[in-house]
Every structure is written in structure tokens, then in C-alpha cells.
Amino acid sequence: MSLAFLSTQGAVEGVVAPLASSPMERVARAAGAQFVFRAGWNVAASYGSAQREREACAEAVGWVDLSHVGKLEVQGAPDQLVALGSELAGREVAAAGGGATPIGSGWWCPMAATRVLVLLPPGGGDELRETIAEALPRLAPSASLVDLTSALASLVIVGPRAREVIARFCALDLRPAASQVGSFHPGSVARTPGGILHEGPDRFRLLFGSALGEYLWTVVADAAEQFGGRPVGDEVLMEIDRETDGTSAHA
Amino acid sequence: MRLAQQPGERIDRSRRIKFSFDGRSVEAHPGDTIASALLAGEQRVLSRSFKYHRPRGELCFSGRCAHSMMDVDGWPGARACSELVREGLRVQHINAWPSLRFDVMRATDLFGGPFTPPGFYYKTFIRPRRLWPVYEKVLRNAAGLARLRPAQDEREWRTEYRRRHCDVLVIGGGVAGLQAAIAAARSGADVVLADEDLEPGGRLLVEGAHEEARDLVRTAREAGVEVLEGAAALGFFDGLVPVWQGSTLHQVRAARHIAATGTVEQSLVFPDNDLPGVMLSGGARRAAALYGVAPGAAVLVAATSDSGLDDALALYRAGVRVVAVADLRDAPDSADLAQQLGAAGIELISGSTVVRAAGRGGVSEAVTARVDERGVARSGTTKRHECDVIAVGGGEVPASSLLLQAGAHATYDERSGRFVAGELPPSVHAAGSVVGHESAAAAAASGSVAGLEAALALGIGGSEVEQQLAEARERLVAAGGPGRVAVAPALATDGRRGGKAFVDLDEDVTAKDIAYAVDEGFSSIELAKRYTTVTMGPSQGRFSQLPSARLIAKATGLSLGEIGMTTARPPWVTVPLGALAGRPFEPAKRSSIHGCHRDLGATVRWAGDWRRAYDYGDPQGEALAVQQTAGLIDVSTLGKLIVAGPDAGAFLDRLYPNRLSNLAPNRIRYGVLTSEAGRITDDGTVCRLDENSFLVTTTSSGAGAVEQWFSWWLATWDMDVRLTDVTQGLAAVNLAGPKAREILSSLTDLDCSAEGFPYLHARQGTVAGVPCLAMRIGFVGEVGYELHFPAAYGEHLWGAIMEAGREHGIRPFGMEPQRILRLQKLHVIVGQDTDSESLPAAAGMPWIVKLDKEEDFIGRWALELAADRVPESKLVGFTTANGHVPTEGAVIVRDGVAAGQVTSSRYAPKLDRVIGMAWVPTDLAVDDAQVQISDAGRILEARVTTRPFYDPEGEVLRS
Amino acid sequence: MSYVLTCPNCGTREVTDFAFGGEVTERPTERPTPRELNTYVYFRRNVAGRQREWWCHRSGCRSWFLAERDTRTQEVFWTALPGDAPPADEVTS
């Protein structure tokens, strides 16, 4: 495929194993992150105390670097995209402005009638990738697919103070009347293009250009510190997901 | 002097704290402001005025007058009458030298009058011109109000920003605002209330109803209102209201706004009305009620409405000796008030006002009289009163600037003698005294009405809301209208000479100044304001709106309604620049390889909104390395667009002046984008990836604009094309130099031989295990490979290439050496060597325009017209003889006249010459022509060349 | 300028989320005279009143859309994707 150079899927392990890094890897390391090699990526799995990280998520606010999670952009005719999305999600998906639909623990996020951002599951998106690769030519034959995993960075902000933290640097209206679980808000985040996915109760996934990784981490950490916030590893986040599975929006 | 404990006072008498004022220790209670503590200690003079350096005392007791500006712990501009005392605070006066008691600059008051009339800077200090530096120094030292700390980090501080969306924003927490907030919140709205005072309650706090105020605040909070105290709304910006609280700026966007901002008391104009001891009557009342401080030993009250009489009685009951009340009206509205004054033994002088204040360094006597229609005292009605305070009430002006900024209009209501804001825009409501509902009952009812109307307009709450609204409207009608206000004379005087009558105390503008300005022709309020600077001081004309309008009306013969009010501008209160412009963090883009540059000790600079490696400490050595061994540069900032779809090629043909649809797969072409005027807007490369997709690169700073340009045309054309911006998704590096081929070969299975991978070809494969698009293009003039790969592998691939190149002498190189190298090849940098008027033919690339293309393309018509004309100037290269590198931007001169411009210039180490690019007249745009550069006062001789300085045929590049 | 605009895809946002694309102009359909070309390239009606104009949600969905706005008061009458926009009024204020 001639767009293979955009995706980490084509990496080849040879003498030197290529290591895919999040743009926030260095600042995370400086904050005490301990890394684990997952599916070719160096992932900040913990920050030294799972208990403190859990407490932050439950009582204050925590932020988690999920930049390694796969992101795909699908562009095509509106009806074809709806057909594709609905099959992947197992239910009718909305058009742009109608919110995002879960696909397992991934998300189908319409940006416009002809463009959708697919977020793959954090645990490993290979299965969904294959499903999409199979379904695309069948349901959306004239659609195109571009891997944006490296193009967009992602921070999940979770906890009872999440909205207050976000209000320090983002003008999006996330009040309960304006945003529910599944709402998708493309728009400026900390004065840079991006968007926020309301992916769970008191849980928001920020998406933004990967070149702004270090900047956004600094902004979020600064805003969250006054509320007792701390960085959280993806191990704790996956634990929380497993515990809430069945009661979470992904059901 | 302290009074007996007052109900509702803010001070805690059980504790004492100390602070220093001008080095002197002063005692205070917690809850005191600096001004109340000083006044309690008999310190009447707080500052010296702006121009004349006359002693000034407390005026408003609400934190708005400029009189009380002081330096508090090194911070200038604090208002003593609202700044709370803290233990150990160091307070200094401002604007007086050597001391508050004796100020040298008072000379301007005594002698300098003729030199400083209004607009004096247009008339005086002009000749002789050679003394301008002297004048500047003197004026600079004389002007200004305080000193900033010199060190930048001592001046910096942190502003918190916080976005708040809500249904209803209530501005003003008096009884009207509180009732409005409660009504809206109880209906179900999400309400924020902002009050600028330390605690909400407005006039309730001063009129002995502080318990009621606290109850209302509690009720509001229980109803779910977010109450912001000490929070001033700065202005109305198309529905966004910034609220400044402490060091936090709340950016509030509400669906409906309710302005319950109250009124501002106006001063009176009479000779020497600026003496310490002259204060607003509401201010005097606040001093007693909130801080238990007597404004003075003997107070004369000058009133124009019942509220002045009420203030006098309140002072009396607080224990202050009130010598008399001069009421401009012939009789009060409320007979009851007259009776109470009589019972208190306070003389009520009807039909009179103050016509002079007298005293040295402070009030010692007030003169009252009946005045005629010119404001001059009628003979035989003059009375002298011994007093040390004159409490004046010159009418109320609604604090309507927020409403006016929102689009309301101010008109003068003759009957009530007030300016009134009307024609409110749909999303804005008003309640309370700002729209004439003065009494507590009327204000409360109007607040409820506004709150319920707002909820109703938002569709919040059920049918009960309509019912409650009807009831509230009835209560409002029953509460009655505002009381009568006598219109004060523009200038009241006893007719004798001497003394200055001030209309604007901040700017030291006198009644005479206004008369002069109108005399000179500045007869509209806006012109007179700018000429005299009236209302332009720190209090922004809070207390001088009506007085200045009255004076202009008197001088011009126009009515107050015809004069109008000056434009209301934000901010409503003084706010530090940092609150408006300070940013904790600047958005910075960094390539995924940036960490490596830091590790290598690169000089990092801004390039647009990217942080980039300018060099690694040795730009010339880095440039040489590229030409001698190999260099590696991070070019991840390049804009990168995937253009895909069946119509992709045709789409590109329409946007570019050359042909791109006929590119074969894995072939690359240089692309220059032109505007509809045929001018160069951006450049880059276009590489065909396969039948239906292209990778387009753009300049780093143009990435966003090009993507928008492409997508806009796509929105108007019906073509099947998909655009995806992958600028940040792909990292890119350029490996260039004689050893580049060898280094790359060691990392990949791709055939990198000259035959296997020619110039302007692309290959896809893995490099150091990373999927990669390799493009053989040249910007730096050597054999080079631009590698595009997923950004996540940035550090990995950079490290692998540096490692593989180590034995060959590879060096990293930054933006600066890159500029030297590209200049050697005469490569244009769009935006530096070209501007918005540059045509391709004039910029040395006529070949990029294919007018024989069948398709219409952007800029075609303009380029066809341009093809027939000879451009006035052309972009060429040049060298200079003497080794001086001309400044970029230096002018090409011909016969002493500007004829072009140097756009780029550098010393090229490999060529050991100074080289550059410049726009020169077309007849000089030929090899070996001589041109002259005017640079920093010298003339440099330069020789033109139209061919690259290095490898002009491109043999090295294509090898 | 601190008003809000409603992106047809994403909803209401601060105006700073968007890039302004200028008033809607008519591109000549055949080769224009020099005067017609200059008018198209450089001249704008610059209406003080209701104006039809282009906006791009550059911070969000990056789509282009049309709007009609009163340039004096910033009141925005409607926003719509190009295909959904009401037909242009020949006589506008």
C-alpha cells in the first residue's frame, strides 16, 4: 500500500528494533513514568504508585497519555461511511454533530458527513484494524483510509475535577446539559486545533496535533496540580476499564 | 477618629495589626482598608494630584478614585480605599517628591498654570527645538504616577484563566442582582453572579441592612448560584464577559446577561473642591458604616436629592457631628427626613449649595449660598460653616457602560435628570438603580422581573415562571419611581477670585479648562474630552461624567441630552496588562526528534510556531560538513498533505501553474502555488505515490494556509478528492552530502545507486526497520535523501542514521547552515525572497508556468496578462567584494533612489565569498551587472549573477 | 471580536476557532478583461450590514461553510455547509 509510510504497522524488527514513542515520552519520564514495550510502542505504564494513581482518578484528577492508541481517518461518501460505521458498531451511527459511537472499546467519531475519525481500542487495535480492512472494500468501496496514529496525540483526563481542569485552557462547553458520554467536540484545545471526546463519566479524551505533545502535557499538568492531579499510567486506566466494563459506555 | 461600633462594620476591633505608611507605623484592625486606617489616625492627605501636585484626600471610599492610589509592597496602583490592610504591609505615597507633606512639583500649581493649559503639549515646550531632549526629561520625570520595579521577574505574576459557560450571568450583587440571580436559579437556570465588592449586598451593607444582604447571598448559594465576590466584570465583548477576581480571569459566556450594576455618585464643582476633606457623601457614609471611622470632626453635607439627607442622618446616628445640610432643592421629597434632621439639631439650608471650600492643606471652612442660573451666589445668601469635611452629592449616573458596550443607547431623561440606558439587545436585561429603580423595594422587584424574564427567554422553568413574573411586575409598579434630583449648576461659585474648581480630579482638569477648550472650537463632548483629557484618568470619569457634561452644556448652550455621554470602553476597573495578555504557556510545536536536538546542545529558536534547531553551535562548520562528508537535518516542520482520489491529479492541475497529473508513480516535481493574481504564495514538492494519491509538501509556515486553500477550492468544485493533513504525523529528515548514499545504503535494502534511485525519484521501503518514503530532492545542493516516516519513530531513526554515519563524519545541521547551503544554489525561500506581489517569471522561475496547459488553473488569467509585460525588477543573486555581509532588507540604490532590495545574504564558507539574493531593476538583472547596496549608511558594490554560486549545472545534485 | 459561530458539523464555538474566508465573490466564468480580473482579485463590496461570507472551522472539523452576518453588530443570521445554504439574495443591504 502506498500509504504504508504513514503507519507504524509496517515496522520491521531487525538488528535494531524500532521503538515508537509518544511525543510526551520525555516529559512523562521526567515526571517519573515507567515504560513498557507494547505492540511496538514505548508506553508509560505507571508512575510508581498504582494506589496514588487510582486515588487521583477517583477523588481528584489524573491524566493518561494514550498517544500510542491507533487512530484512523476514513473519508468517503456519507452513506457508505454510515454503512461501514453501523456494521462496525453493531448499531446505527450518527452523522457529524450527532456524537461518537463506541466500537467495543474503540470509538467511531464523525467529523463531517464525509470524514470520520476511528479510535482503536487501547488494549491493541489489530483486531479492529483487520475488521475495518475487510469491511471497507465491501461497504465503502470508494472510501480512503489514512493512519493518523502518529499525527494526533491523546491525553485522557479523568476524575471528578476533570471539567474544572479542562476549563482552565479550553472554551468547549462540557457542562452536563451540553455534553454527555459519547459527545464528540472537535474544536480548539489550549489554543491549538483538536477535539474532546466525552468517553465516560468524568472522563474526557483530548485529541490534538502530536507536535503539541510536550506543550499540552505542560498545560494539563499545570492546570491539574492545584486540584491534586497526577499523571496516571495506562495500567491503572486499563484496570479501571476492566472494573467498570458492563457499566461503562462501551456496553 | 474611630466611632463607636457600627452594626455591619467590617472591622474586627478585638485585634490590632500594624502596617507602615511612608515609613511611619500605623495601627489598624483586620478588615480596615489602608484609607480607613489612615483616616482613623487623622491622616487626611493621601496623595498629590497628577499635574498640579495639590494635596488630595479620600474621595469615594469604594476603590475607584485616583486620590487613593498608592504603592503597596512595591506594587503601584493599589487603591487605598479598597486595599485591605495586612500585617507588615509597606505602603508608600506616589507622585510627590520629596515627601507628601512637601512636594517640589507643587510649583506647577503655583506658577506653572500658564504653561500647562489644556492641550499644552500642542502649544508649549515646542521652541527652541534643541531643548526637546531637556523638555522630554523634565516632563517624563514629572509625568506618570508611580514607579514600576525595574527587574522583569519582579514585575511578573501569574494569571489564572477559567472558562465558565452558564445560562445567566448577573453583574452586580446588590439587592437587584441578588434577587435576579435567585429568581433565575430557582427557575432552573445555571447562574453566575459577580459582585466587585468584598461581599455582595451593595447599598444594603451601607444602609444598615447587612443581615438582609447576607441572607440573600445565602439564599442565592442555596439556589445553586455561583457567587463570585471581589469580582469585577471588565466589559461586554459580543457576549463574552471577562470577570477579574484576585488573580483569576473568569471568561464567562452566558446565554443571557443581567446588568444590576447600580449607579455612581457624582461630585460637585466649586472653587477648591479638591481640598482633602471634600468627599462624596456616599463615601463619607461608607467610612462610618463599614469601618467605624469618622470622616472628620465636623461635616457639612451638600445634597441634591433625598439620599444626601439620608446620608447626613446616617452620619449623625453613627456619632459624627453634622454641622448643616445644604439642599439645592427648595424642599425635600420626604417631609419625614426634614423632621428627623430638625430633631437631630442639624440645620437644613434649602435652595443652597456649596460655593467655595477653604483651608490650607485641607478643608477648614465651607461657604454655602443660593445660586443664580449662572451658578453664581446670590448676594446676601452666603453662609460660612466651620467644618473639616464637605460631603457632596451631585446626582447619580447609572453604571451603564456594560449595557452600552452590549449595544444599548444612553439618552437623557429631562424629568428625572438622569442619563438612562435603553434599547437593550435581546440577550441583555437590566435591573435596579442602573435603570432607575432606586428604592430597595423597586430594586428587588426589578431584579426578580429580570431574572424571571431571562429564564423564560431561555425556555427554562414551567408555567409557574410566567405567574411569578406577573406578580413581580406588579410589585415593581407598586414600588414607585425614583426620587427627584435637582440638577446641580455646572460651576457653583461665590463670585470671588482665587481657587481652582475641578471637574476631573484625576487629570487636574478645571472648569476653566473646559471653557477654554470649547472656546478653541472643541465643542463636542468627544473632542473636548480628548483635548482636555477630562474623564481619561484612572477613574475613567466615574465621578465627572455629569459635571463635565454640564460644563460643556453651559459653554456651548446645548442641552445635556444633545451633549450625550462619552463612549463607554472596557475595562470597567483597572486591570493589570498581564491579566489580558499574560499567557502561562505559549503553544509550541516540536518535532518528534526535538529531544535529540536538545541533547546535542542545539540553539533552539522559534520558526513560526515551531521550535527548531537553529544550529548546533557551529553553523559554518555544519554547512561545510554537508558539502564534505554528510549532514542530517530535521525537516519535520514541512507541511505535508495527502491528496487522494480519482480526481486528485486533475485537482492539482487546477491549483498549480504547472502540470502534475502526468507525474508517473514515484516521481517528484517542484511545485509553486500561485494566487488568483498569479503571485507566488507557497512552494514545495509533489510526489505521486500511486495512481490515485500524491504527497504534497509545503513550506513550514505555509502548511495551514495551503491546506485551507486546497480545501476551500475543493468545497467549491465538485471533484472526488480527499485531503488529509499529515504534517505532524510524518517526521522528515534530510540526509545530504557526498557520503549520504553510503550511509543510507547501510540502513536499507533499497537500491540507492545513482541509476537505481535517480534525482527527483521516490522510493518506499524500510530504513532502520521503519517504513519510509524516501525522496531524492535537493535543497542544499548535494546528493540528498528526504526521508518521511511516522513521527513516532523520530528519535529512533535520527539515532540510527547518526550512528550509521558516525564513521563517515556525519554532522547534524540546523536551519542556519541550511540557509547558507540553499543560498549557494540560489534556491528561493517563499516569503523571504518573494513577497505577495512576486510573479514567477520575475522570481527566476518562468518555466514553472505552463500556459500551454489546457486546463484552467488558479492564476492563469493574471499570468497570461503578465506574460506580455516585462517586470520592473527581477530576483537575482549577487556577490560583494569586500567581505561585508549586507543586512537582509538593505536597499538597492540607483542614482540615489531606491530601486530594489536585498532579501537574503550570507557568508558562504565553502566558496569563501559573501553571497546573496536581491530584487534589482530588470535591466541590471544580467550576469556581471554592477549594483549598489545602501546598508547602514554605507554604499556596497555588488555584482549580479543569475546562476547558482555552487554547482550551477546541478551535476553534483543529480549524481 | 468575541462572538460565537455555529459550525454546521460541530456546533457553537468561539469565533477564534475559525478562519475567516472573506465575503462570497463570483469567479469569472470566461476569460475576464484586465479590469474584470482586478475587480475579482482585489475589490470587495465590504458591506456595512448583512454579508454572505466563508468560514473554515480550522480548529475543529476543518470544513468550509457559509454564513450571513451583520458586519456592524456581529449578529450571525445563519451558517450552513455550501450545499445547504439558502440561495443568495440579489438585493442585500
Image (spheres, coloured by chain):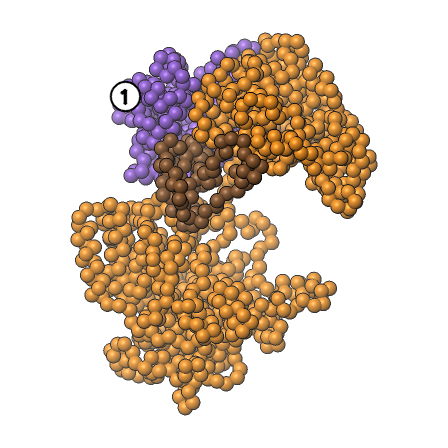
Q: Nearer the viewer, residue B613 or A158?
A: B613
**In the drawing, does residue A80 fall left or right of residue C23?**
left
Q: Which residue is mark 1?
A: A91
Other residues around mark 1 within 10 Å, as few (<14) / some (14–19) / many (≥20) = few
The residue positioned 74% from the left and 28% from the top of the image is B946
Q: Is residue B147 visible?
A: yes
Query: Quadrant of residue B483 in the image?
Result: bottom left
Describe the element under mark 1 as helix, strand or loop: loop
The kind of residue tagged 1 is Arg
Query: Quadrant of residue A235 in the image?
Result: top left
Q: Give the purple chain's letter.
A: A
The residue positioned 35% from the left and 82% from the top of the image is B351
Q: Residue B907: give x, y in percent of width and height.
A: 75, 32
**Compared to A155, does A126 lie above or below?**
above
Q: Colour of chain C?
A: brown
**Compared to B139, does A217 lie above or below?**
above
The residue positioned 47% from the left and 36% from the top of the image is C26
Q: Quadrant of the C terminus of chain B?
A: top right
The residue positioned 49% from the left and 81% from the top of the image is B359
Q: Residue B245: give x, y in percent of width and height.
A: 41, 52
Q: Residue A8: give x, y in percent of width and height.
A: 48, 17
Q: Nearer the viewer, residue B510 or B384?
A: B510
**In the drawing, does residue B723 fall left or right of residue B141?**
left
Q: Give the orange chain's letter.
A: B
Q: Which chain is indicated by disc 1?
A: A
Q: Is residue B209 visible?
A: no
Q: Quadrant of the N terminus of chain B?
A: bottom left
